[in-house]
Amino acid sequence: MSDPTASIARRRRSDLSVAEGDTTRGRRPMKGRQVGAAVAAGILAVAGVALAGSPAHADGTLASYRVVAQGQGFNWTYDNPTANFHPQVDNELPYAETDGDPTRAHAISSLYWPGAAGGNLGSLLAVLGYSGFGALNDPVRAEASTSSTTKQATAAPTGTTMTASVVPDSGFTQEASSTASWVGSPLGSAGSIGAVSAVAKQTLDGAGNLVATASNSMADVDIGGTFKAGSIATAAGEQSAGGGTPTLTSTITVTDLTIGGQHAYVDGSGVHMGQPGKPAGSAVVDSVSKGLAAAGMQIYFTEAARVTIGGVAYDYAPALLVYWAPPGDTNHDVFTFGFGGAAIQMVTAGGDAGPAPVSGASSADNGTASGGTGGASLPAGASGLSAVPPSPGATSLQLPAPSAGSAPRVLGNRTQSLGNAGLATAHSPGGIGGGWFLLLALAAVAGAVLAPRLPALLSSVTASTCANDHTTPNRRA
């Protein structure tokens, strides 16, 4: 099983039941072996895309630039030691991305953006003994490009929407935008997934002002009755004036957060027990740590971070990651849920010699030290774009001191059980709450009923360039 703990960014030691070295890019659960394939199949079968629009014109005001904005409502993974590949499931739900340079603009959104397995779902089903699903190698999506269809949109009675457009509004010489949203679903006693959305946008005006924004939000999050949040939202924005040094802002906002039944909150430095200005005492901190250990859960916080790869800086908004290995599960299933981590890449010609530092951000460099601005020569990837790397690793939970003036406590791992017996309840004989697979089961049924319509649905939304054949920011092909 792949280690859900690899990271790039600087890490801080956790407070609540976090093992040393555990970190990951935000990811999420639901799933089980062939069931994972059924999820994508069901969602693909239910969506359709309508085409509209007229050609847009990309006016390269700057000497040269490249920009990418990417957000996902949340990312989840599922894995177990006996899986044929790792992780067995890895995808975004939903996903939105824009990218562009002086010659083109592109936008794509998808309700269910698959990882390695889902991105080749038709081939995977063939390996599993099912035939006739080759079209599933392309996920249903809304996609637009200045070189082909300039606007697409789709909506379903279930509350699913996907839009993509490269038609600039008045005052802009280039624009790309994409949105994807889903109403979510209750998962019975195992928790809930509320309304979730992802948005990405970039604009360029006649004065050479380049702006990119990405955001994601999710409501009514409940994981195993242990981690609950009224809403989780992150946003990242980056802008450059006339080829100058790009400046970044990023935020994370979490409301009505409880961990193990106790109030908690998130700020720029991490996750804390208690309420802003009223940190919880040591008894509460110890109790929650024990409760997380009993529930098989670990929680991580990722600071805003800049990662430089091949001379290109990628900026990430803060994020939360929940790692869950349900206790008593004889199959040793593991889930990860990643909330946030909107990402932006902006490289411009001209201006200062390097990118401005991100306030409060950690930094890791896997390439050269050059920054977001420079001469007319820009580091190039496939199709003129470099792929946005996975979200940099996570820093662990940072809890405040029980009393003002003393240093934060690092709790480490706890082995005792919390007195709250409700933390690890509602599990099947194997240890996994059946509610987590409710959505998968519904998707599987929908996929079986609508399978004959899939080729027509998918052919109606296939863009001139296959999404799996060109490089796009945070895609795992």
Image (spheres, grey):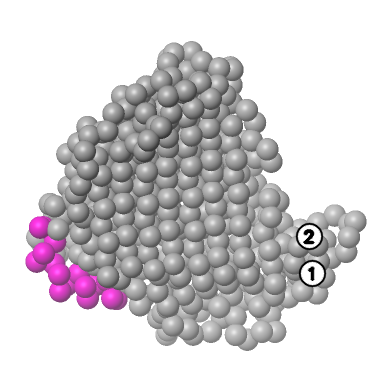
Judging by the rendered image, the residue that carries numbered circle 1 is 280
Judging by the rendered image, the residue that carries numbered circle 2 is 400
Quadrant of residue 114 within the rendered picture: bottom left
Measuring 69% from the left and 67% from the top, which residue is drawn there? 264
Q: In the image, 210: left or right of 305?
A: left
**Is disc 1 surrounded by few (<14), some (14 to 19) or many (20+) residues within 10 Å?**
many
Query: What SS does tag 1 mark?
Result: loop
Q: Taken as a whole, is the magenta stretch helix, strand or loop?
A: helix
Farthest residue toward the right?
A: 405
Q: In the image, 400: left or right of 161?
A: right
Residue 457 seen by the camera = yes
The magenta stretch is 441-456
Q: In this rendering, is residue 357 above or below 374?
A: below
Question: Does the magenta-highlighted stretch encompass residue 455?
Answer: yes
Measuring 82% from the left and 70% from the top, which residue is drawn there? 281
Taking depth in this image into account, of 157 and 206 the one nearest to the observer is 206
Farthest residue toward the front?
A: 170
**Is disc 2 surrounded by few (<14), some (14 to 19) or many (20+) residues within 10 Å?**
many
> Which of marks 1 and 2 precedes in the sequence?
1
Quadrant of residue 50 within the rendered picture: bottom left
Q: Amino acid at mark 1?
A: Ala
Q: In this rendering, is residue 436 above or below 246?
A: below
